[in-house]
Structure formats: structure tokens, C-alpha cells
Image (spheres, rainbow, N blue to C red):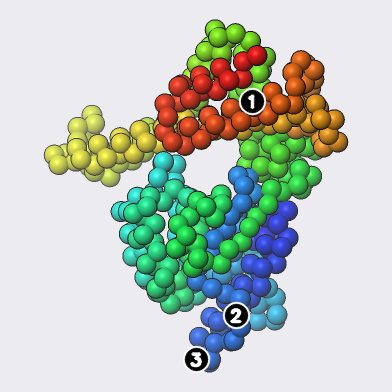
Amino acid sequence: MAVWDDLVGQTKVEEQLAAAARDADALVTAHAAREPAPEASKMTHAWLFTGPPGSGRATAARAFAAALQCVSPDRALGGAPGCGFCDGCHTTLVGTHADVEIVRTDLLSIGVKETRDLVRRAQLSPAGGRWQVIVLEDADRLTEGAGNVLLKAVEEPAPRTVWLLCAPSLEDVLPTIRSRCRHLTLRTPPVEAVADVLVRRDGIDPETAQAAARATQGHIDRARRLATDERARARRSVVLKLPLRVDDVGGCLKAAQELVDAAAEDAKQVAEEIDVKETEELKAALGAAQGGRMPRGTAGAMKELEERQKRRRTRTQRDSLDLALTDLTGFYRDVLALQLRSRSALANTDVRDALERIARDTTPERTLRRIEAVLACREALDRNVAPLLAVEAMTMALRG
């Protein structure tokens, strides 16, 4: 199994990264032998991976990081780096390699302090003698100040330090940063490719895998969750019933409240699973006495953890709402396809009766306005509009 096996439907990107990994290996070999560096190398110190949600941006970055750390003996015989089995590949993929820092956040933003810590890490020489790799999975969440801190590190990179940044689009990254990165664009994987990987890697039966891949339109992580999590299927079912419940003002307001409440419940479940464990671990690290009594001077650390957990609950609620809105957009896209007699496959075949009913009772122009209302709600949430207010405005726009 090569490190690229989980990179679904991205043949061109895989070829570019594999070529860069081969040249990176040649650079390390030349350095160890005190020979001149090869000319015309495809390797560079900063990369930017962009693509729609579910395209596998972070998967590509982690696979490339593993290939850079590959120590397989086959490389000396002409084999490509990224075997997937050696110590370098394995520890990178599981997140324990000493020279690979993988940064992901469940908060609303990445601040200056965290970015400065990363920049300091990037100045270190690689302990294993190959590359110091920083994978920033949420580069779009850098604050402006954090982006400026990162810019200096990308402008003046330390020797054999590699930055791998991930973001939905070029516009989500500061122009000064993206101009200094090699850009790779990933596409949404084909439904068939996603279904195949669910069957092959996760052991999901082909029919369920195909249905989940089709419903999520090629979003790998969402497809896996939909195929394996009963709660995810139940939440999606509720969302897809919403278009039939917005015939009057009362129905609109009730549907909006239920959608926001469901997102809040998601955040609460995540908190119950993670917050208690985090709190107990911090208390133990700070030397809590039997019975939970904390030593003097530790209140600040506990308060900082509580604030972080609060921000994470907010982010989780926003992400859950955004997922629901994505499903709703897909519903109305299917309605539009029926109205225009498109030959494209429907994503939500399990609610075809509802799709046909709304397609029959309204017009393509009205469907487009409804899609615009859903997109406007997503934009409002990005601007930190109160969730209930944003969703109520959307459901009222869907009425009629």
C-alpha cells in the first residue's frame, strides 16, 4: 500500500507530488554525500493545496509529507518514495513522526500565538536528517495577524523545511502567501471512486457505499460518516424534510428552531465526548489533589481550557449547520435538475417523491432563488450572524 492510496480521484496531483518527492529524495541524498544539488528540481519549500470540501486536500498533504520522510530501501533501486510501510511513512501517517507537525483546528480561527509557535518549530533542523514538514490543514482560518507571521517564514524558509498549506480556494489565503507557494488544485472525486474506496478500505457493502457517495456528491469523509453513523443518516433525513415544512410562517420558524437545536445538540455531544477527558487530563497534569481540589495558581490554566472548549462548541455548531445547509442545497439542485429535465444523476434519490412534488409545484426561477437563500444563510453564518436569526431568514425565503 503506497501513501497515495487514500488520495481518491486525483491522478494528476498524485503524479506531481510523486515527482517532487523523487527530486526531494535526490536533494537529501546529494546533501548526505556532500555532492552538488541536482538542477531543475520539482521540489520547493512551500505548497498550497486547494479544492472543494471532501476533495482530500489534507489527505494529499499528509501523503506528500509521508513520501518526503520515506526511508524505504527500494528508493536506492529506483523505487519512488512513499512506500507506505517504512518507519518514515508509517509514523508520518499515524502522526508520530518527530519531523512532521500536522496542525488542524476545531476552533473558529488560528491566532498569532499558535502561528509563532509553528514558525519557531520550522526553524529547527530535521532530527531524522530529511525534512522538517509543517502541515497546516486549515490555512483559511489564519487571522490576518497570524498570516503576516507565517509570511515571513515562507519568505525566508529554513533549510529543508517544507510548508504544506491547505485551504478551500486561493482567495482564502493571503495573496502574499499564496504567491510564494506552489499551487495544486484538487477536484471533487467521482462518486464511483468514493464508493470504491468505502468498500475497499472501510468494508462497507457496495449498495450502501454507492448511496452514501451519491448523496454526498463525492465528499469522502461525509460519505464515510453517512454510511457508518446512524445519527448522521437521521439528521440528514430531518434536513431533507424541511422543504416540505415551510408553507407558512409558523412552519418556517419551527423548522429553523429545530435545525439550530440539532446543531447545538451535535456540539453538546462532541463536548461530552471530549471536554470531560481534556479537563481530567489537565487537572491530573496540574497536580489536582484527591477530591478534585486544585493547587493554587492553576485557575488561569483551567479558565483557558474552558474558553477553548467554548470556542470549539461554537465551531462545531457552525460546522453542523453548514453541513445541513449543504444537504439542503443538494436537495434544491436535484429539484432544478428535474425541472430542467437534466440527464445528470440525482444525489437524493431516497427522497425522490419530495423532489418531484416540489419540482412540479414551482418553477426553475423559484428554485434558483431558494438555492440563493441557502447560500446567503451560509455567508451570514461566516460573518458570525446569530445562527437562529440567519436560519429563520433562510426558511422565510424558502416559503411558498
Label 3 is placed on what type of residue? Answer: Arg
Looking at the rendered image, the disc whose residue lies closer to the viewer, 2 or 3, is 2
Label 1 is placed on what type of residue? Answer: Arg
Residue at the disc numbered 3: 34
Label 2 is placed on what type of residue? Answer: Ser
Q: Quadrant of residue 366?
A: top right
Quadrant position of the C terminus in the picture? top right
Residue at the disc numbered 2: 41
| Outermost bottom residue | 35
Task: Give the left or right position of residue 113, taking residue 17 as reference.
Answer: left
Image coordinates for residue 357, horizontal then vertical, percent: 78, 16
The residues tagged by marks 1 and 3 sit, at their Cα atoms, a distance apart of 64 Å
* Contact flag, marks 1 and 3 (Cβ < 8 Å): no
Residue nearer the viewer, 210 or 366: 366
SS class, disc 3: loop
Please tell me which of labels 1 and 2 falls first in the chain.
Answer: 2
Q: Quadrant of residue 81?
A: bottom right
Task: Give the left or right position of residue 178, taking residue 278 as reference.
Answer: right
Residue nearer the viewer, 87 or 170: 170
Residue at (38% x, 50% y) in the render: 143
Looking at the rendered image, the disc whose residue lies closer to the viewer, 1 or 2, is 1
Asked if residue 260 is positioned above or below residue 381 in the image, the reply reads above
Task: Give the left or right position of residue 125, taking residue 23 as reference.
Answer: left
Q: Which mark is residue 370?
A: 1
Asked if residue 220 is positioned above or below residue 95 in the image, the reply reads above
The residues tagged by marks 2 and 3 sit, at their Cα atoms, a distance apart of 17 Å
